[in-house]
Amino acid sequence: MTISALGINHKTAPVDLREQVAFSNEQLDTALQAIRQLQGVDEAVIVSTCNRTELYCQGTVSTDLLLGWLAGFHGLQADALIHHHYQYQDQQAISHLMSVASGLDSLVLGEPQILGQVKQAYQHAKRHAAVGGVLERLFQQTFRVAKTVRNETEVGQNAVSVAYAAVSMAKHIFANLEKSRVLLIGAGDTSELVAQHLRQQGVSDITVANRTLQRASELAEKIGGKAHSLAELGELLPNADILVSSTASTLPIVGKGSIERALKKRRHKPMLLIDLAVPRDIEEQVNELDDAYLYTVDDLQNIISENIKNREQAARQAQLIIHQQSEEFGDWLKSLNSVELIRRYRQHSQKIAEQQLQKAQLMLQQGKSPEQVLQLLSHRLTQQLTHQPTQILKTAGEQNDQAALALLEQLWPASSDKTQKD
């Protein structure tokens, strides 16, 4: 019974590689069905966010098979991922998942969004019948651990996120941030967090552009902003001092040409563009323009590093909780192996007993004496039940297998023979 975790994240791979192996919601449906077809995969959950893509599997699947599947699904050669992936098994895999869900492995230490993203990944896999008893229990315990970490440590206090880091950067660049005009592309959770942080900084002029106008209107109503569709992007860009984009699009939404035209209309008044999406929403060539300042999630690392220093002690406390909980789950996982062995042993013994009982009953029906039948039943049961243990003992003795002999000695210690004689 093995739990495996394989993935890449912001620590091991650049953004351009991470975006190549990110799964869209539409791809997840197909991917969950496909990964379940791999030899040795009994259960699976795929976690895919802007900073990580991770495969959690229960079964006896090899790392090479998982890595090859992940690369092949996205049209890559396995060599493209060989130096950028990590893989864990059992105790390490359990501990890693709990650390991820608790925000300890995030770009921003302690950020709360990842727990919701892990929950969504689990629910998605469950809807596709990819989660069984082992991963069900693992993810439920992981969610409890993440809650405990939040409640019992300071890792969740003054919570920050990639959205917060983006606003912090804007605040450093614009002396009067509250007077800036902001355009948010995308109306998901990240955009909402950005809007909330902007509001806290006194920004009032916020426009939301989204593929679905209704969703843009819902977010705009929450934050007191204006809603538009992406079709109006060309008209909206010249009015934006700050553009923050976070969508699930698989192709860039904002190109170099559109920003170049917007800058001309702005008479080259500078624009700050922050791309929080993976795959990226804004073409990297935008950085070639003199008055456009483009930052991706990787560029936020300096701001994030300052926050990490303030949370290191809380993270150490959280790791102690995770270590204890992962050990407990690991012990339960190990017990499943003995449970299965016990079940098979009992079934085997029960089958022998039933077969010999049927033979004994047949002998009684044929007129054999009960005493003779009982003696024969006892002899046959003894012979069959001790045959395999005897062979194992004999082989262990011949091979001088002291470990096996010591284990078998626990079954029949010498003191028990004396007790029986007494």
Image: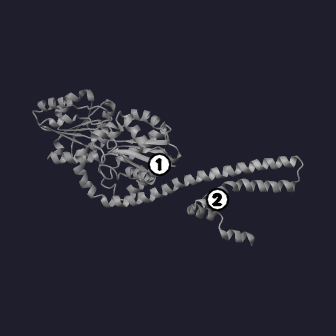
Residue found 34% across the figure and 54% down from its top: 156
Residue 202's place in the image compared with 399, above or below, is above
- Which amino acid type corresponds to the residue marked 2 in the rendered image? Lys
Residue 120 in sight: no
Q: In which quarter of the image is residue 239?
A: top left
Residue 232's place in the image compared with 90, above or below, is above
Residue found 58% across the figure and 54% down from its top: 338
Residue picked out by circle 2: 394
Q: For the residue labelled by badge 2, is the local secondary structure a helix, a strand or a loop?
A: helix
Q: For the residue labelled by badge 1, is the local secondary structure a helix, a strand or a loop?
A: strand
| Residue in the foreground of this view, choosing between 280 and 408 | 408
Find residue 340 and name its label: none
Q: Residue furthest left?
A: 267
Residue 324 place in picture, x, y as percent = 44, 60
Q: Which residue lies furthest to the bottom in this view?
A: 422
Residue 61's place in the image compared with 24, above or below, is below
Residue found 17% across the figure and 48% down from its top: 172
Residue 34 in sight: yes
Question: Which label's residue is closer to the chain start, 1 or 2?
Answer: 1
Front position among marks 1 and 2: 2
Residue picked out by circle 1: 3
- Which amino acid type corresponds to the residue marked 1 in the rendered image? Ile
| Residue in the foreground of this view, choosing between 389 and 260 | 389
Q: Left or right? Give the position of 118 relative to 377.
A: left
Residue 419 place in picture, x, y as percent = 71, 71
Residue 111 place in picture, x, y as percent = 32, 50
Q: Quadrant of residue 9?
A: top left
For the C terminus, the quadrant is: bottom right
Q: Quadrant of residue 394?
A: bottom right
